[in-house]
Image (cartoon, rainbow, N blue to C red):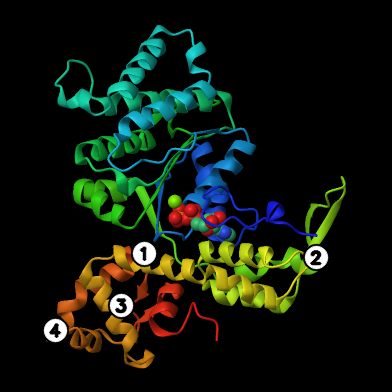
């Protein structure tokens, strides 16, 4: 018997979901590129993962951080920037925690003790330290120094890396704080330490530090406007799109073949199975949105108590989830500037093969395609909602379904 208590689905939480789908390119980038290269002292940029709400940015980096922690790496605690908060304080606090994992407070050098107490001051006062015109170093240089010490400690330990993850970057309201933060992280990433190699030669190597920044696509504008080319040289940006249906299908495979194991209430375990048709319905309804995938799965789980999840339960569960699914897409649309929303609406109103820039611009009441060019460019390269091919297509499949079909109604 299944009960809501045993559901492995987790809509709306950004902990690492138990039923995990896809994102293999990003996971492999961490395991096969970023981590090994930084461990080897090779330069590798920080990673910025952007995307619309619900695409799984926080979960992805949580999963990477969990993987790192399993290997014994030093990882920042959950660090999301609340709107309007001073990020330097938050980051200083998180770095002090990483410094504890690195056992820096036990270091004998006086300079490290002094550095830690300067970081304590940043953790308490944040960016206001700069504005107050105090003597002494700017907060960002203090943070860079600490990152470098953490990196040195990791290098000495061997085979560990310090992973810094800062979430909800778009919430940083102060330009001053943002540029200080990006400089501190970037300077630590590009810092090179001289080390002696066997044979006596001295070489320069990067420190074993990795940085992940996550947030809404707007963050690309904020960072670009302020630090432009420097930011791009130091951070590599990925905009997440929907998850492929194949990946969602594979994620549910354990339910099909052996069943998902849950406690049976009497000290043993039992397994919950899923009909292939039920799985196909979940995949179809979620339109590549990880949030909706979790929601559809959870509601199907709740829609019955037996050991088999069938298609009827998926559909009945979706009834309960439908308004939430609609609200999810409406929130994404409502957050867009009016021009961008209009563009998507006019694009959706055209027949798929007629969705060219000229035709969409004309529907918007503009006389030339080029007048809508910047809008379409943003929707493509910054937000990842559409693809400017010939013709234009939607990349965000839930937005497409919402604007062009009866979805989330089930026919
Ligand atoms: N790769 C994934 N596979 C399955 N579910 C996922 C995946 N990534 C995220 N989710 C689920 O999607 C929802 C939104 O994820 P979250 O990380 O909070 O998105 P974001 O930070 O982009 O807003 C959560 O319920 C999470 O469990
Ligand atoms: Mg998030």
Residue 66, relative to residue 342: is it above or below?
above
Mark carried by residue 331: 1
The residue beneath circle 2 is 307
Image depth: mark 4 or mark 2 in front: 2
Q: Is residue 310 left or right of residue 357?
A: right
Read off the residue under disc 4: 366
> Measuring 52% from the left and 62% from the top, which residue is drawn there?
291
Task: Measure the C-alpha gap from mark 3 to mark 2.
Answer: 43 Å
Name the residue nearer the viewer: 156 or 146: 146
Vertical placement of residue 238 versus 114, above or below: below
Secondary structure category for the residue under label 3: helix
Circle nearer the viewer, 4 or 1: 1
Q: CA distance from mark 4 to mark 1?
A: 26 Å
N-term mark: 4 or 2: 2
Q: Is 37 placed above or below 126 here?
A: below
Q: Residue at x 51, y 11 (%)?
A: 106
Q: Residues within 10 Å of mark 1 (few under 14, many from 20)?
A: few
Mark sitting earlier along the chain (3/2): 2
User: Which residue is rendered at x = 83% and y = 52% of the image?
Assistant: 264
The percent coordinates of residue 251 (x first, y second) are: 66, 64
Q: Position of residue 20 (x, y in %)?
A: 62, 58
Q: Secondary structure at mark 1?
A: helix
Considering every residue shown, the one lying at the far left of the view is 367
Query: Given contact means CB atoms under 8 Å apart, are the residues at marks 3 and 2 in contact?
Result: no
Provide the residue designation for mark 3: 344
- The Cα–Cα distance between marks 3 and 4, rounded to whole angstroms, is 15 Å
């Amino acid at each position: 018997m299944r009960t809501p208590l045993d559901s492995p689905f987790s809509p709306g939480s950004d902990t690492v979901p138990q039923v995990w789908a896809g994102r293999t390119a990003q996971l492999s980038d961490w395991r096969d590129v970023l981590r090994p290269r930084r461990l080897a002292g090779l330069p590798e940029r920080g990673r910025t993962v952007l995307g619309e709400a619900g695409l799984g940015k926080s979960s992805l980096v949580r999963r990477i951080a969990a993987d790192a922690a399993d290997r014994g790496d030093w990882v920042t605690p959950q660090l999301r920037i609340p709107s309007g908060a001073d990020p330097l304080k938050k980051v200083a606090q998180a770095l002090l925690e990483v410094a504890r994992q690195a056992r820096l407070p036990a270091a004998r050098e006086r300079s490290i003790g002094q550095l830690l107490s300067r970081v304590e001051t940043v953790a308490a006062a944040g960016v206001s330290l700069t504005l107050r015109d105090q003597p002494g170093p700017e907060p960002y240089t203090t943070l860079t120094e600490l990152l470098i010490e953490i990196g040195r400690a990791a290098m000495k330990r061997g085979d560990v890396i310090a992973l810094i993850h800062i979430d909800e970057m778009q919430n940083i309201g102060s330009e001053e704080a943002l540029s200080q933060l990006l400089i501190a992280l970037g300077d630590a990433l590009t810092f090179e330490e001289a080390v002696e190699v066997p044979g006596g030669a001295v070489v320069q190597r990067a420190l074993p530090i990795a940085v992940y920044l996550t947030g809404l696509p707007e963050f690309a504008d904020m960072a670009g406007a302020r630090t432009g080319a420097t930011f791009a040289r130091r951070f590599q940006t990925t905009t997440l799109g929907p998850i492929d249906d194949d990946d969602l299908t594979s994620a549910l495979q354990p339910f099909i073949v052996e069943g998902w194991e849950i406690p049976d209430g009497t000290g043993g375990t039992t397994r919950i199975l899923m009909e292939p048709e039920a799985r196909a319905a979940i995949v179809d309804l979620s339109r590549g949105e990880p949030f909706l995938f979790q929601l559809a799965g959870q509601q199907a789980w709740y829609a019955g108590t037996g050991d088999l999840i069938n298609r009827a339960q998926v559909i009945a569960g979706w009834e309960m989830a439908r308004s939430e699914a609609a609200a999810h897409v409406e929130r994404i649309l409502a957050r867009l500037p009016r021009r961008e929303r209009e563009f998507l609406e006019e694009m959706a109103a055209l027949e798929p093969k007629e969705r060219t820039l000229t035709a969409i611009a004309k529907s918007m009441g503009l006389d030339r395609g080029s007048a809508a060019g910047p809008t379409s460019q943003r929707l493509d390269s910054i937000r990842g909602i559409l693809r400017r091919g010939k013709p234009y297509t939607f990349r965000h499949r839930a937005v497409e379904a919402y604007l062009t079909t009866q979805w989330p109604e089930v026919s």
